[in-house]
Image (cartoon, grey):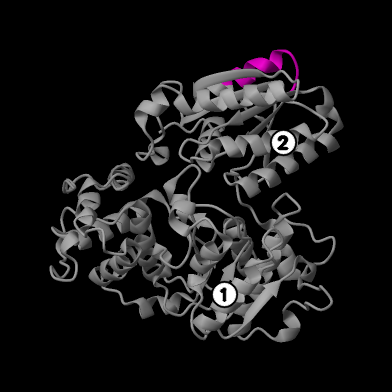
Amino acid sequence: MEPMNSRARGYKDAVKALNSLQSNFATIEATKKLGPSVNRNEVSLREVYEYTRRLGYKPEDFNKLNLIHVTGTKGKGSTCAFTESILSQYQGSNGPIGKIGLFTSPHLKSVRERIRINGQPINELKFAKYFFDVWDRLSSTESSPDEFPHLQPCNEVKPMYFKYLTIMSFHVFMSEGVDTAIYEVGIGGHYDSTNIIDTPVVTGISSLGIDHTFMLGNTIESITWNKTGIFKKGVPAVVSEQVEHPEAIEFIKERAKERQVSSLEIVSPNILPTHQKLGLAGDFQRQNAALAVKLAAIRLEKLGVPSDELPNYEEALLPDKFISGLEKTQWPGRCQIIKDKPGFEKITWYIDGAHTIESMAVASKWFAQQMETSKPAANNIKVLLFNQQNRENAGDLLVKLYEVMASSKFRFNHVIFTTNVTWSSGDYNADLVSMNTSKDLVDKLVVQKMLAGIWSELDQKNNASTRKHILHEIETSANFIKSLTNEADVDVFVCGSLHLVGGVLVVLDNEHD
């Protein structure tokens, strides 16, 4: 890892250095030296403790952040957003809530989105400051050569991308005086970088499903074991109803007992008023909102808010501030509708970052429902914009989408398979660079050609005919879609990847670096 030039300390320099940690050669090579007998998951978590120690923190120091820790296969980000929005209604000069921190992943347009305070991403100046605080401290402190031989030399070996941002987020929130922090797990739970939290206020688990099998295993039992690793002794745990995998509940109960939680609640969406409005679209969001209501209520209860000012679950009654928080929640890229964007008039974009089999089914049903209930859309041109660059089951996602659409009343006129490259020039926005993607596969459009082939086979089986397009960049795809407005208004379904969604949002806003 090359040392940073002392004059190169701005936001762009921070992003460049951060991106280098996606394919951190020094760290990868150092980890290989551990040998095959070492549990690398255990070592990875120990590294987070060690890096935070070198920053000057102990795990118990973070208890002052009053952490709410959330995991799940789908809906965990939305749950965090709902929770933040509810708690924000209790801020103010006389409110019990001070600064609220929110750590989530991945980001859509800017890496700063991952670290928010009071609903806003930290600004570029603060991001650069805290990034280099961590960088410099880790470059100038040592780990024990006996205990952590693979972290030598300290000026070269740095945490990988997500781990670095996790550590940085703790430093940001501690430095900025945050007194309630909501943390979304990256992957799994037990070995996740966020799981150095000593004593959170409450832990939560949203809907579970099969995902990240290479890390978490390919059974609900193994995935549940990993997710419930965030349960802590003496801390309440709140879990969504597991509609798709009810068998997970027994595993959850076993782990709750094993981890000695203070209480375990299984939350039904029925605790919400029947016609409760939500800021996030999709019927499935009721489950995430219900989980968030419980998480927020536990935090407020610990702050001394009287019980008569908290939700009445038996009668499904919510205080006005809870209702307002749920209605005002925003979480871009999830069942998001953007209409008549300047430069893209006559186009309605239906955007969802679904990238698991279960979430793809849900998002596809949401889009189909939008088309069926929107009468003006009957004569509109229907376009699918799809990519999933990094997952082995990309084809399975596409098949699930096709199955849902085949059972609905309409068909796509055009299907576009693109990469996640942002601009027609062939460049990415710096915040959207992914160094874990094979440049050769992207340049040769290998995945896109494979997906187009799968769609052709599905069309053939269903006696259908869709015009397919393989385009290299998101901007090129958007311009092609814009050309279709010469014929009619256009409805576009964007899905398959949050990286694709982020690129589309950047292009629609014309946010060049």
Q: Is residue 100 visible?
A: no
Residue at 36% x, 33% y is: 438
Residue farthest to the top, as pictured: 486
Q: Is residue 308 above or below residue 398?
A: below
Q: Is residue 124 above or below residue 206?
A: above
Disc nearer the start of the sequence (1/2): 1
Q: Is residue 263 above or below residue 90?
A: below
Residue at 49% x, 84% y is: 233
Q: Nearer the viewer, residue 163 or 57?
A: 163
Horizontal placement of 451 versus 377: left or right? left
User: Which of the labelled discs sits on residue 403, or is there none?
Assistant: 2
Whole-angstrom CA distance, mark 1 to mark 2, is 46 Å
Label 1: few (<14), some (14–19) or many (≥20) C-alpha neighbours in 10 Å: some
Residue 340 drawn at (x, y percent): 69, 29
Label 2 amino acid? Glu
> Residue at label 1?
97
Label 1 amino acid? Ile
Horizontal placement of 365 versus 354: left or right? right
Q: Secondary structure at mark 1?
A: loop
Magenta stretch: give its range.
Answer: 479-489
Residue 343 drawn at (x, y percent): 61, 24
Residue 102 drawn at (x, y percent): 50, 62
